């Protein structure tokens, strides 16, 4: 009777010490969930979610302060990916945060630009080049379409244009397909 | 022997034996040929059309930049567009440029694309042609540069720039050049007609390409149903006095004309997934490309003309043409005695891999091997699609040894990691799985969609990474500025507080100011 109790106690102590050591030795500094959530966000840094950037939103989600349906640029696919990661139910985008729009970029009307640099300061990804009292322009390939440069512009010279899929970027459309009992829709 | 376990080096050794024996590839289909109807008449050049529409996208890569504008005169063979590092576009006639604008063109999207519209003057005046003199002793780089100048692309359909493929082969020690003359898709007969009518030119092109690649052997693969072709090619090779050119007949199974399938038939080896034939020391070119190489290097002529089959039950007299790039399909159809009454659909390419086009104003491009006019009878009522019953027929016929039924479900449910793992990128879109599917699932449509989606996701994640990096860099920079400003402020405050040496600093400042005045000749107040 005594021997099994002793054996089990010893085992318990050994394993307990092992686990305690591992908890200190392999401690994870930052919360890996935040990293993984952040990796799924589109990094437009547009702030439509109500947080000042993608990472703060990721932190808010991990603290369960924010819901997963607050990111319009991520779209339905983004919400689904977040739901998969966090084991939650996917839901439609919260209309308070904006609506699903096709990918856009901004262009500066160079005739009207007065060179005030306000948009340059607002751009979170440094996609606008220019200097004081000199013309500014947008590097289209770097623009994420966050529209943060629109409000500060004093002369309203920034236009939003939709990115049209040219013939080189054309993709085959999704076939209609039939309702398949084996496939969850 | 277990071929997957073999080292690459021993595979390359085995590949040197290409064509000695023929082997089999997995799956494939025996299809009705339907080629004879377009092979009855000899190939002719149609009359000059009223307008030629030359698309600026005829190659793999970006849209070419046009060099000409409306109203300009051009000569036959003049370069009118270029896209680095892909292929150049040349004028097929001498005449006047009417416009550079968007026109309907051969593209699966059905979207119009930028084209140069040329009205011929009928003089057929060539630019000064600059062939490579004495090509047999010219350096391979000279030959490759000439091939690039002349705008050559793979004429089998993939339109990959020939110079790029050749240069890559040159760098990778090629032992065998394979010329692909096994056009396995039903109805298409332009390569067969070319081999019948211009075997000398193909052999000449093969020798030029062999020199450019530094290869030892040439293997020309033709189908066993091509009758007189083998004799013609063998005779041409003998006349040229060139050794190490062999003509091999392969069994007609669709799609043995696919590059990877053909290499498997000739060597028994599989080109590694994600790899290229040059991994096995081989380069594969279409026979028509070889003929174009001969034109380019020996005569200096750019690629402005190709053989094209105009066929199908919707055409009165199906036949082959040697047509100028830019000729509208309607012009070719008129030269065939027009459509039959019950024509229903126009397809560019063959019945298995082609795609429908909306209008016959679409012009011939470098890739156009066939125009197929189908009748209502040909396009039987599309049968209703049914759920997959997991019969496995599609996997049995797949020449890339994929599992189409599995991929279909994965794409449908968006399991993109699994789609990648199951090798969607190895799909050649041959349509065999579609053809045998008892549930009439348009599998290839799903696979094309899946490939597009994969490309889109790759681009998106690239853009996300770029944005993240730029955002983080900017944050770091702003933080650095802030710290630097704070440091500067504390330094200044420190100086104000510091009583010792204050008189010296004031004297220094006054001296600096005076120095500035004497140098510029202004008082500090003026400045």
Image (cartoon, coloured by chain):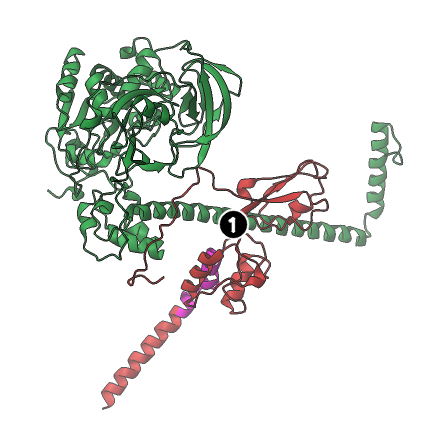
| Percent coordinates x, y for residue A39 in the rendering | 46, 56
Which quadrant of the view contains residue B49?
top left
Between B261 and A41, the one nearer to me in the picture:
B261
| As drawn, B155 above or below B461 | above
Extent of the magenta region: A23-41
Q: Secondary structure at mark 1?
A: loop
| Percent coordinates x, y for residue A105 in the rendering | 56, 45
The green chain is: B
| As drawn, B29 above or below A99 | above
A17 displayed left or right of B219: right
B32 displayed left or right of B60: left
- Residue underneath mark 1: A102
Q: Residue furthest front?
A: B341
Residue at figure coordinates x 28%, y 53% from the top left: B385
Between B318 and A97, the one nearer to me in the picture:
B318
| As drawn, B209 above or below B477 | above
Instruction: Examine the structure image and report whether residue A39 is included in the region drawn in magenta.
Output: yes
Residue at figure coordinates x 31%, y 44% from the top left: B425
Between B485 and B2, the one nearer to me in the picture:
B2
The red chain is: A
């Amino acid at each position: 009777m005594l021997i099994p109790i002793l054996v089990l106690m010893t085992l318990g102590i050994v394993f307990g010490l092992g686990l305690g050591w591992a908890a200190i030795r392999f401690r994870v500094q930052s919360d890996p969930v935040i990293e993984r959530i952040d990796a799924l966000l589109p990094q437009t840094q547009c702030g439509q979610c109500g947080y000042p950037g993608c990472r703060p939103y990721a932190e808010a989600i991990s603290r369960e302060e924010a819901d997963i349906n607050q990111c319009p640029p991520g779209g339905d696919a983004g919400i689904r990916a977040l739901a998969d990661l966090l084991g939650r139910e996917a839901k439609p985008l919260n209309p308070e945060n904006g609506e699903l729009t096709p990918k856009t970029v901004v262009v500066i009307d160079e005739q009207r630009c007065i060179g005030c640099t306000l948009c340059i300061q607002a751009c979170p990804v440094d996609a606008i080049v220019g200097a004081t009292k000199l013309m500014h322009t947008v590097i289209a390939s770097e623009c994420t379409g966050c529209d943060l440069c629109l409000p500060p512009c004093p002369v309203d010279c920034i236009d939003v244009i939709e990115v049209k899929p040219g013939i080189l970027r054309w993709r085959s459309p999704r076939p209609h397909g039939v309702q398949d009992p084996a496939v969850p829709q | 022997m277990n071929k997957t376990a073999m080292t690459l080096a021993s595979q390359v050794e085995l590949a040197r034996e290409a064509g000695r024996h023929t082997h089999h590839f997995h799956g494939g289909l025996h299809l009705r040929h339907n080629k004879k109807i377009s092979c009855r008449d000899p190939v002719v050049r149609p009359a000059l059309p009223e307008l030629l529409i030359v698309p600026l996208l005829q190659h793999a890569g970006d849209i070419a930049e046009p060099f000409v504008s409306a109203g300009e005169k051009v000569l036959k063979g003049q370069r009118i567009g270029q896209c680095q590092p892909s292929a150049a576009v040349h004028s097929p006639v001498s005449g006047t440029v009417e416009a550079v604008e968007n026109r309907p063109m051969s593209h699966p999207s059905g979207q119009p694309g930028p084209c140069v519209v040329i009205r011929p003057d009928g003089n057929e005046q060539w630019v000064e042609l600059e062939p490579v003199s004495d090509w047999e002793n010219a350096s391979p780089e000279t030959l490759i540069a000439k091939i690039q100048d002349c705008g050559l692309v793979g004429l089998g359909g993939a339109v990959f720039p020939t110079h790029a493929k050749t240069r890559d082969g040159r760098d990778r020690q090629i032992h065998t050049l394979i010329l692909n003359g096994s056009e396995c898709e039903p109805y298409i007969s332009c390569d067969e007609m070319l081999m019948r009518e211009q075997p000398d030119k193909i052999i000449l092109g093969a020798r030029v390409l062999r020199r450019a690649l530094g290869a030892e052997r040439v293997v020309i693969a033709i189908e066993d149903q091509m009758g007189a072709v083998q004799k013609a090619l063998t005779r041409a090779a003998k006349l040229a006095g060139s050794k190490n050119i062999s003509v091999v007949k392969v069994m007609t199974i669709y799609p043995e004309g696919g590059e990877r399938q053909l290499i498997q038939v000739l060597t028994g080896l599989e080109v590694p997934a994600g790899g290229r034939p040059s991994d096995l020391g081989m380069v594969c070119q279409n026979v028509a490309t070889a003929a174009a190489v001969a034109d380019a290097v020996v005569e200096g002529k750019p690629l402005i003309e190709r053989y094209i089959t105009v066929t199908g039950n919707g055409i009165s007299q199906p036949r082959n043409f040697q047509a100028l790039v830019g000729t509208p399909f309607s012009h070719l159809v008129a030269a065939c005695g027009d459509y039959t009454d019950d024509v229903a659909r126009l397809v560019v390419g063959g019945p298995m891999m082609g795609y429908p086009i909306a209008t016959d104003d679409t012009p011939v491009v470098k890739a156009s091997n066939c125009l197929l006019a189908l009748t209502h009878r040909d396009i039987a009522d599309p049968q209703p699609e049914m759920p997959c019953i997991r019969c496995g027929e599609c996997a049995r016929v797949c020449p890339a040894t994929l599992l189409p039924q599995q991929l279909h479900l994965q794409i449908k449910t968006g399991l993109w990691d699994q789609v990648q793992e199951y090798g969607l990128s190895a799909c050649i879109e041959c349509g065999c799985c579609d053809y045998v599917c008892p549930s009439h699932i348009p599998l290839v449509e799903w696979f094309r969609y899946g490939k597009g989606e994969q490309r889109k996701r790759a681009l998106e994640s690239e853009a996300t990474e770029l944005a993240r990096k730029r955002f983080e860099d900017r944050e770091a920079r702003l933080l650095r500025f802030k710290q630097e400003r704070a440091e500067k402020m504390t330094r200044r405050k420190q100086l104000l507080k510091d009583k010792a040496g204050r008189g010296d600093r004031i004297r220094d400042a006054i001296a600096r100011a005076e120095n500035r005045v004497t140098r510029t000749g202004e008082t500090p107040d003026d400045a």
